[in-house]
Image (cartoon, helix red, strand yellow):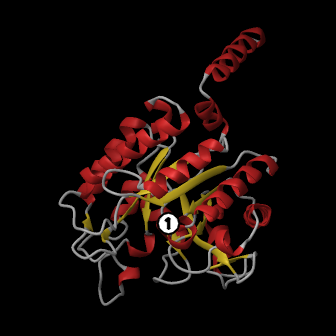
Amino acid sequence: MRSRRRIVITACTALVLALPAQAATAARMPAVGRAAPYEYMGWGSPEPPAKVMAATGVRAFTFAFMLSDGTCHPAWDGQRPLLGGIDQAAIRAVRAAGGSVVVSFGGWSGKKLGVVCHTAAGLAAAYEAVIDTYHLKAIDIDIEHTEVASAAVRQRVITALTMVRRHESRPIAIYMTFGVTPSGPDAVGRDLIRRAAGAHLRVTGWTIMPFDFGAPEPDMGAVSVRAAEGTKRALMAAYHEGPVAAYRTLGISSMNGRTDERDETVTLHDFATMLAYARLHHLARFTFWSVNRDRSCSGAGPDACSGIRQRRFAFTRVIASYHG
């Protein structure tokens, strides 16, 4: 029995070594965050995470957002401390219920660490401070607005993440989340992917945000798939890899209900389309913004409800059904 096991291990090792570098690297990374909806503890009437887990079966959350406190030091929303606050309490609650967490850096608003930290080494240290504080197995870089707009900052983020990869003693999943057009990444998005490939940075999932397109799309499920296909082609070109490897480092992060754009709505039917696509191609990630909004409106503001009629946690249940 022992000799047979040795033969199997040797064969598996040979197979991994034969894989393309992108796929081999992905095989060593933890799958934490594959289906981890966003929740923001700072506003939008956040739901108790353990309650959401019990109601939906979801096993992980992406907590947002880690920003700059005005210097090259991280703080929740740029204001709340890493320890002793509502965010740490939420992380503890998820883990106590048997779940896992991802911490998201960036987002649209606030002071971004990538901008405020003037060196890649300083930015890497800020990322690592959060990783070490919470003993994280996954982080999300939601690169938007001022971070993604500057070529210098894009390069700083990529270089810092290569340092994190090199410094961390244990494998950590890194998700890069960014906006796209209906046909895939724009010039800035393609540049971000090319810079990562040029730096030999292998992320766990290039997660697109297929919404806020600037004009209403009649079928948000179909257009999300089209944007994902365009991103797959960009990954294939940048990393010189085939479609299977590209799909397995591709992710989708949608938005439930009415988005930030007038007359743009993502329905449960659209989520079902994205779920089928994710399952077909074994995407690295399927998630959405956000648990705070996963309920009908009853006098609540736009950050605390979806803007459509729905059952409570309906979109989270779809995400919870994705297993890769």
Q: Can you give x and y, in whole percent of width and height, for residue 34 in the image? A: 52, 49
User: Front-most of 122 and 313?
Assistant: 122
Residue at screen point 75% across, 59% down? 135
Residue 6 spot, x, y in % from top left: 75, 14
Q: How many marks?
A: 1
Visible residue check, residue 179? yes
User: Dot 1 lies on which element?
Assistant: strand
- Direction from residue 234 to residue 119 in the image, left or right: right
* Crowding at mark 1 (Cα within 10 Å: few <14, some 14-19, many 20+): many
Query: Is the residue 264 above or below the residue 228 in the image?
Result: below
The residue tagged 1 is: 38
Q: Amino acid at mark 1?
A: Tyr
Q: Nearest the camera: 95 or 28?
A: 28
Residue sitting nearer the eye, 316 or 307? 307
**Is 268 drawn above or below residue 1 in the view shown?**
below
- Spot the residue most to the left: 218
- Image spot of residue 252 (x, y percent): 42, 53
Is 219 located above or below residue 250 in the figure?
Answer: below
- Direction from residue 54 to residue 141 in the image, left or right: right
Residue at left 75%, top 80%? 71
Q: Residue at x 74, y 70 (%)?
A: 118
Residue that extends furthest to the bottom in the rendered view of this protein: 299
Report if residue 203 is visible in the image: no
Viewer-side residue, 276 vs 46:
276
Residue 14: quarter of image: top right
Q: Quadrant of residue 78?
A: bottom right
**Residue 66 pos. (x, y %):** 63, 72
Residue at image coords 46%, 49%: 251
Answer with the quarter of the image where residue 1 lies: top right
